[in-house]
Structure formats: C-alpha cells, structure tokens
Amino acid sequence: MGTITSIATGIAKVSGLPGVGFEEALKFPGGIEGIAFNVDEDEIGVVLLGSYWKLQAGDSVERGGHVGDVPVGDRLLGRIIDPTGRPLDGKGGLGPQVSGTRLPVERPAAPIMDRAPVTVPLQTGIKVIDALIPVGRGQRELILGDRQTGKTAIALDTILNQRDKNVLCVYCAIGQRAAGVAKVISTLREKGALDYTVVVVTEGNDPPGLAYIAPYAATSIAEHFMAQGRDVLVIYDDLTHHARAYRELSLLLRRPPGREAFSRRYLLHPPRLLGTRHPSAS
C-alpha cells in the first residue's frame, strides 16, 4: 500500500510503494486505475485513467501486481469500449476476465528482420487511392490534411469496404468530440460494418491518460487477432491528440516532452515467414 502525495491534471505522485514496476497497474479509491509512468527513488509518477478529481492527497494506493492491460478476443467485435476495456455501449460487461483474454497495453516490438514482407493489397474502396497509392496489408499509412478535408471519411470508407473481405477492423477515436464519434458509430451500424469492427473511444473531456494509452490498447486488440492468422485494419483518429496528451503528461511529470517518432495508422497482416508481430504504436 502507498499514499498519494499530490494530485494534478490527470497525474498523481505516490510514495510508499517500493519495488513497483514501470507501467504497473495501480488501484486508487473509488475503482480508479492508474499506470506507473515515472519510477523514481522517492516517489512514483502515475498516469490516472479515471475521474481523478475525486482523489486527494493522503488517499491510499494499492499495487495491481501486473502491467496495464486490455481485454482482447472475439467478444469485442461489435462493441464500443474505452482503452481500459470498460463498455460504453450500454450492453453490459465483457464477460469474466479469465486468463488469456487480456494483453498488456504496451509490448515490445519484433525486430525488423523478423517481419514478413508486404505482398497482399488492401483495397480502400476509393478508386483513385487504390489506383495511385499501393496500400498493402502489413503496411503503415499516414493520412495528412487540413481540417474538414475528409481524412476520417477515407478511413471510414476503408472500413466499410472490408465487408466480406476477411479483414477485421479496429477504429480508435483519440480525444474526439462525442458527436463526431457518435456519427461514425451510427454509420458503421447502419452499413452493417460494426459486426467486424471494434471501436475504442476517448473523448475530448476524458483524462489525458486515456488518450495516451488509447492507440496502444487498440494495437494490442488488433495484434491478438493477428496472432490468430487474421488480417486487421487499425485506424487511429487522430494521433495529433495522442501527441498532445503525451506532451501534457510529460510536462506535468517533469520529464522531456519530445518523442523520437510520431505514431501512425497500422494495417496489421498475419506474418507469413517467422511468426512474429508488428510494432506497437510508439
């Protein structure tokens, strides 16, 4: 057991937890979860994943004994969840948390030489893109453009075009407006695409910690399907909000806010050579 020493926007400083590991899950009062982000000698910087305004200095903190994880599996198809696996669609829980149904939010990536080549195309359903831009399964593709130019529309059309193509989809909304996410979900449900799609949602008013782990959670969900030999399309919409959340948390925790790379969208494809996995979204 440990004690909260201070609380800020989306983060907490905790003392009295010797031996805690990096990215270990921590439990706060009221069922609020957190992930150990800064592991210093005297205190731990924790990224909070819930309604942190209910916490205060002096509250107790308990170690979870495992790294932060997310539920995976076929039971997520057609569901709308947050990055921790809590359902947002009012359909109840996701079943018992039995062994083998959860994966760590962030996992090590396979070496470059162990990854299979990109050989199978992925059709977006937009003739201009399919004719001019070679998009393959297993490839990362970044969609750039100004506001209101149709970036999300391209991604949404691509999901709709995967019907009867044996491609599962994961749509990850990072820091989006609730109305925009609701419109996307309504379109997916109307076109029958929600049957093969998992929707991971963080809204603009959610804690920055949820926006930070959202693409990692979506990638773990997709990699579970990939490990079964199934093709997966992952859409991160959009990673600008993820970068802002990371920098906000880093500045609050007094660590360097820069990053070596900017996260990108993934098209996960089952490895064909050496049974390896694709990189996490970092």
Image: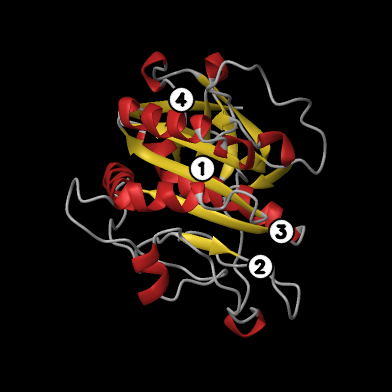
Q: Please, what is the three-letter code of the amino acid marked with disc 1?
A: Ala
| First along the sequence among labels 2 and 3 | 3
Say which residue label 3 marks: 230
Mark 2–mark 1 distance (CA, rounded to whole Å)? 25 Å
| First along the sequence among labels 2 and 1 | 1
Residue 222 visible, this orientation: yes
- Counting from the top left corner in percent of width and height, residue 123 is at 50, 64
Q: How is the image coloured?
A: secondary structure
Mark 4–mark 3 distance (CA, rounded to whole Å)? 33 Å
Mark 3–mark 1 distance (CA, rounded to whole Å)? 33 Å
Q: Secondary structure at mark 3?
A: loop
Q: Secondary structure at mark 1?
A: strand
Say which residue label 1 marks: 36
Q: Nearer the viewer, mark 2 or mark 3?
A: 3
Tell me if 116 is positioned left or right of 207 in this view. Answer: right
Q: Which mark is residue 223?
A: none
Q: Please, what is the three-letter code of the amino acid marked with disc 4?
A: Gly
Tell me if 254 is positioned left or right of 209 in this view. Answer: left
Q: Please, what is the three-letter code of the amino acid marked with disc 3?
A: Arg
Say which residue label 2 marks: 277
- Say which quadrant the C terminus sits in: bottom left
| First along the sequence among labels 4 and 2 | 4
Tell me if 251 is positioned left or right of 219 in this view. Answer: left
| Local crowd size for mark 4, using a 10 Å CA cut-off: few (<14), some (14–19), many (≥20) | many
| Local crowd size for mark 2, using a 10 Å CA cut-off: few (<14), some (14–19), many (≥20) | many
Say which residue label 4 marks: 50
- Say which quadrant the N terminus sits in: top right
| Local crowd size for mark 3, using a 10 Å CA cut-off: few (<14), some (14–19), many (≥20) | some
Q: Secondary structure at mark 2?
A: loop
Q: Nearer the viewer, mark 4 or mark 3?
A: 3
Who's the residue at 52% across and 39% down the image?
35
Mark 4–mark 2 distance (CA, rounded to whole Å)? 30 Å
